[in-house]
Image (spheres, coloured by chain):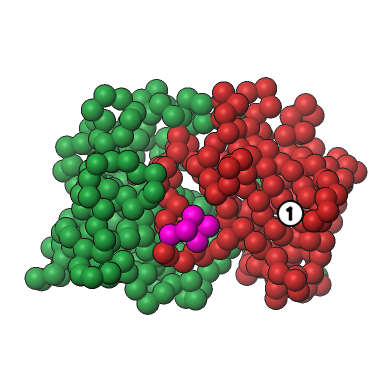
Amino acid sequence: MSVLSGRDWKSQPPYIDQGYKSTSLRGPSRSLVKIDPELAEMTGPAFGDEVIGSLDHDLTRNGRVNGEPLGERIVVTGRVLDENGQSLPNTLIEVWQANAAGRYIHKKDQHDAPVDPNFLGAGRCMTDDQGRYRFYTIRPGAYPWGNHPNAWRPNHIHFSLFGPTIATRLITQMYFPGDPLLAFDPIFESVPEAARGRLISEFSLDVTEEGFALGYVFDIVLRGTQATPMEGTE
Amino acid sequence: MSPRQTPSQTIGPFFHYGLNPVEANYPHSQIAGHCLASDQTLGEHIRLTGRVFDGNGAVVEDALLEIWQANAAGRYAHPNDARSNRALDPHFHGFGRCGTGANEQARFTFCTIKPGPAQPGHAPFISVTVFMRGLLNHVYTRIYFDDEAAANAADPVFSSVAPERQVTLLAKRYHTPSGIEYRFDIHMQGDQETVFFDL
Ligand SMILES: [Fe+2]
């Protein structure tokens, strides 16, 4: 009925990671239980344009109260595709991030850096019929965390994607080229070395909008699915 | 060379204002909430509630759960399910999202309906995806119903799980003054570690 490629463990981080301390009590310790691919989920939630508000793709505008958010404006764009190289149109992307000072608007963020009254740091967009997406934001700052002494997260944007079925679901983080903190970040380093580069966006002068925003390209590859629909009357 | 999978990363501790902001009182809309069913939705209306525990048995207060399920007729609201002898329910989409930090006991609660079996000979179930800080890849599990013993025993996925671990997939049914409630806890580790599927 369907062909679904599994999670590629040469590309994915482990559940328990020595460097990232919270994994030791939160990652499952037993092996995952195999599910017959014939019985795996070939469905999942589909979302339409109704979940995208007019400013959702522009984080430089969707949180404004009395002015513009501070920081360096950027535009992030890319293609969402599957492992077969097929573009994934109409796929919902949700993003969230810290502000330029490295502070989340989240109530539980205790970092002593200023909140920006004009920046929410959350948005959404949908891939077009070519699988392309684009959103505007402010380049996020680095922030400290409690994993180990003097621990800092590299600049990153959190991404959430659905893809065609619940098996293609992905939550990840996009990083920036040349960030010196990457080499010291256990979350980034948890990924097998050969796959880490896929989490780093690429600066692009072509995408950069003259006089307005620096451009970064970040392509996202979801698990491959080829579904044969359940049809007829069984 | 064909493209390779983008690696997963943790959802982190600060996702609420992006993914479930309405529930957490942030000024942003969310794509889906904890209530999947309206008064007009067909089927047995249920409340699905529980908690998530870490390897020390401590309650996890910053998890995000997503559920996905068939409607009362066993049909999924998805183009891959085009079976015309099972009716779509215009009042049921089948997707819900709930964090565990919104109340003092760190419970998640969904209001939904009990799904119908999606295939002849299969038991009804609800798919669950769990995200949290400290989890580098999300986990998948399934909720089966403890009042469906015969159907569960015949179900090809449920019955493929080692018998002593099947109990971790069962939601317990209770009759409460406010309706039918199913309780389902998730244990990330330990003797009661929930079965997570390699989906
Ligand atoms: Fe973050």
The answer to whether B43 appears left or right of A118 in the picture is: right
Quadrant location of ligand 1?
top left
Which percent across, then down, holds residue B139?
56, 41
Which percent across, then down, holds residue A94?
41, 60
Q: Residue at x 23, y 32 (%)?
A: A183
Q: Residue at x 53, y 45 (%)?
A: B101
Which percent across, then down, holds residue B68?
64, 56
Q: Please say whether residue A19 is visible from this viewpoint.
A: yes
Q: Which residues are magenta?
A: B22-26
Q: Residue at x 32, y 60 (%)?
A: A120
Residue A145 colored magenta? Answer: no
Quadrant of the frame with the C terminus of chain A: bottom right
Chain A's colour is: green
- Circle 1 residues within 10 Å: few <14, some 14–19, many ≥20: some
Q: Pointer 1 indicates a residue of which chain?
A: B
Q: Secondary structure at mark 1?
A: strand
Answer above or below: position of B189 versus A135: above
Chain B's colour is: red
**Which residue has dot 1 on it?**
B47
The answer to whether B108 appears left or right of B75 in the picture is: left
In this view, the residue in front, B66 or A182, is B66
